[in-house]
Image: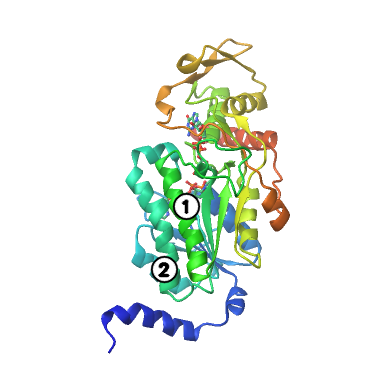
């Protein structure tokens, strides 16, 4: 006789009976994005809406607005029915995730939600493990609980932080992982649970191992945006000096708009797989600083070393950049350089925006924003 323990299986069997074939289901083009309010979430939403998708996003309840990156896309359903719908939720809340999946019945799920700041993960290690690690499991299990494991295509936001300590360069899909932060370790769990559910339950699940990607919508505490905002504010006399941590860390920086295109392509293949998205170039943080000031015609000369290093304006002699050890990390990822050959070959993906254009776009956007703030205040 049936017991309460049989309810989830019975529930998922009933749903399966009512479902069309995975091919038919997929033609509906309904996407669900966790982390829709973040940098990547906003670019992905733009892309999917352009492609005719109905886009659903999970947003966290907040006492202040956290949807500013979506304002240009969002229209209240009362004003006009539209294809972008937001649902309150959280990757730490399993019941809520099951409810959202059951309601939305997505054909594609993009798991972009995360506590995504590496330095913060040392301060909030348990929370980061819960959301960035177990959160992925919760979302995958919500799909299974709803009987949709053969119908949904799943994208996991994996990261070059999995490589951590340098074992080989350039880093590719076959490079061994050696994460160097609670964030990287949590993402390692997510990487493997995504692979495991593909193998165990024949789910269509993909890992995009994405190297750093930036844009004018990048969070303000990540190094690129921190630099471009400071360059804008310093040039307008609103700030005198930029304080940074490790100037010698090297990153493979691309543009977020290019990378969300790669995410979508991963879910359009006949077979699920794991792919590196990268530019194949690496640059130290100090070069980003030099290029960013260079956009406004300011040239920087470095003097001193280590904790007392500073960057000086070669014309005026003003100190514009100083090292502050408070931004050093307990364990650092010194060098990231990706090899995107598999994505280029299989997905036909290639980054479009190069390093100088990325820096220029970000500085110009921050200058414009900072100037209009001054005008608003006047
Ligand atoms: P952001 O930090 O800009 O966005 C993170 C998103 O996750 C936000 O929408 C945030 O919501 C949401 N979020 C945070 N905690 C939770 C939670 N508990 N439940 C649900 N949602 C939550 O990151 P990016 O857009 O830059 O990155 C997207 C994903 O890709 C992340 O998973 C990141 O780790 C990963 N990644 C990013 C790379 C990059 O260079 N940008 C490279 C490789 C991987 P809120 O707005 O409310 O804070
Ligand atoms: P990262 O990005 O840790 O690579 O993670 P971040 O921009 O925070 O740091 C890049 C490098 O710059 C050095 N650095 C500083 N970083 C910050 N944030 N602030 C500073 O003042 C500063 N000074 C120097 C850092 O030490 C580091 O070496 C990002 C996130 O988007 C992750 O979610 C994602 O997985 C990886 O990129 C790929």
Residue at coordinates 53% horizontally, 28% vertically from top-left? 230
Residue at coordinates 66% horizontally, 24% vertically from top-left? 294
Left or right of 363? Residue 184 is left
| Above-or-below relation of 244 to 19 | above
Q: Going from the N terminus, do you reach mark 1 or mark 2 first? A: 1
| Above-or-below relation of 123 to 66 | above
Q: Residues within 10 Å of mark 2 (few under 14, many from 20)?
A: many
Q: Which residue is mark 2?
A: 142
Percent coordinates x, y for residue 96 in the rendering: 36, 66
Left or right of 310? Residue 253 is right
Q: What is the quadrant of residue 124 in the picture?
A: top left
**Circle 1/circle 2 CB separation < 8 Å:** no
- Work out whether residue 256 or residue 191 is closer to the camera in this orientation and state it: 191
- Work out whether residue 239 or residue 220 is closer to the camera in this orientation and state it: 220
- Please tell me the numbered disc located at residue 53: none
Residue at coordinates 37% horizontally, 49% vertically from top-left? 129
Q: Which residue is mark 1?
A: 67
């Amino acid at each position: 006789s049936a017991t309460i323990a049989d309810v989830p299986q019975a529930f998922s069997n009933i749903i399966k009976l009512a479902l069309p074939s995975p091919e038919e289901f997929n033609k509906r083009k309904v996407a669900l994005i966790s982390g829709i309010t973040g940098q990547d979430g906003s670019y992905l939403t733009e892309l999917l809406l352009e492609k005719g998708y109905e886009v659903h996003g999970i947003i966290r309840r907040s006492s202040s607005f956290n949807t500013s990156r979506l304002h240009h896309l969002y229209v209240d359903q009362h004003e006009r029915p539209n294809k972008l719908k937001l649902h309150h939720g959280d990757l730490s809340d399993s019941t809520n995730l099951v409810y959202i999946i059951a309601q939305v019945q997505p054909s594609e799920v993009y798991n972009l939600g995360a506590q995504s700041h590496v330095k913060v993960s040392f301060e909030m290690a348990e929370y980061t493990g819960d959301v960035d690690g177990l959160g992925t499991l919760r979302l995958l299990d919500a799909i299974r609980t709803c009987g949709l494991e053969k119908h949904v295509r799943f994208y996991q936001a994996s990261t070059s932080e999995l490589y951590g300590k340098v074992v080989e360069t350039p880093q590719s899909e076959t490079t061994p992982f050696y994460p160097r932060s609670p964030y990287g370790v949590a993402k390692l769990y997510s990487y493997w649970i995504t692979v495991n559910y593909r193998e165990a339950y024949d789910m269509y699940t993909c890992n995009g191992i994405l190297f750093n990607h930036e844009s004018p919508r990048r969070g303000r505490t990540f190094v690129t945006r921190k630099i471009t905002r400071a360059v804008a504010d310093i040039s307008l006399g609103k700030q005198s000096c930029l304080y940074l941590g490790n100037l010698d860390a090297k990153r493979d920086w691309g543009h977020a708009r290019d990378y969300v295109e790669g995410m979508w392509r991963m879910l359009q293949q006949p077979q699920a797989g794991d792919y590196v998205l990268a530019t194949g170039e690496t640059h130290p943080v100090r070069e980003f600083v030099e290029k960013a000031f260079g956009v406004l015609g300011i040239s920087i000369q470095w003097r001193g070393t280590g904790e007392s290093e500073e960057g000086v304006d070669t014309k005026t002699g003003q100190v514009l950049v100083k090292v502050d050890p408070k931004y050093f990390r307990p364990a650092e990822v010194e060098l990231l350089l990706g090899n995107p050959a598999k994505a280029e070959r299989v997905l036909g993906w290639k980054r479009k925006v190069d390093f100088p254009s990325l820096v220029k776009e970000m500085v110009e956007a921050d200058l414009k924003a900072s100037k209009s703030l001054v005008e608003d205040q006047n």
